[in-house]
Image (spheres, grey):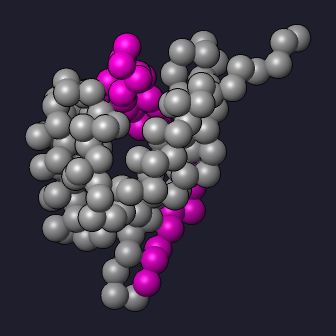
Amino acid sequence: MPAPAEVPAAQETLLRKMYAVFSTDERDAFIPHCLAPDVDWPNVADGVRLHGHEAVRAYWAAQFAAAHPLVRLEGLRLDEDGRHVVATVRPGLRDEAGEHWAEEPVEHVYRFDADGLVSRMDVRRP
């Protein structure tokens, strides 16, 4: 049985940086460096899909206006077909009482375009 393929270095670097800046003031400036212009992104709360930088930027702004979301990256791997990167993450929230983390992780599944930017993200339970 062959060894499982590793996440390509460029994709790993991009995703690690994306998670590192998500909960900071750098997130808006980083959007064009990580997301394809026509990115397809989930709005999990409303059960709809968002398209493009401005829609994702507005979604993130609304999340941060309501609370301070956190996402801790716990691992990266390729999915079963080797075409998508799966990030195991622990969602959380920061408020005046501190940080609160979900008991169970979720998976963010990423597709990339020819330029190496995220073209689609899906959320699923492991």
Q: Is residue 126 visible?
A: no
Q: Residue at x 55, y 36 (%)?
A: 12
Which of the 4 image quadrants contains residue 64?
A: bottom left
Point out the image quarter for the N terminus: top right
Residue at the far bottom in the pictured view: 97
Q: Residue at x 16, y 31 (%)?
A: 52
Q: Position of residue 122 (x, y in %)?
A: 39, 32
> What residue lies at 23% left-to-right and 51% top-to-bottom?
29
Q: Which residues are magenta?
A: 98-126
Tell whether position 116 is magenta.
yes
Using the image as rendered, state which of residue 45 and residue 15 is in the foreground: 15
- Residue 75 colored in magenta in the image: no
Q: Quadrant of the C terminus?
A: top right
Residue at 46 percent of width and 48 percent of height? 17
**Seen in the image, is 22 located left or right of residue 49?**
right
Q: Is residue 63 above or below residue 84?
A: below
- Judge whether residue 99 can be spotted in this image: yes
Where 100 sits versus 21, above or below? below
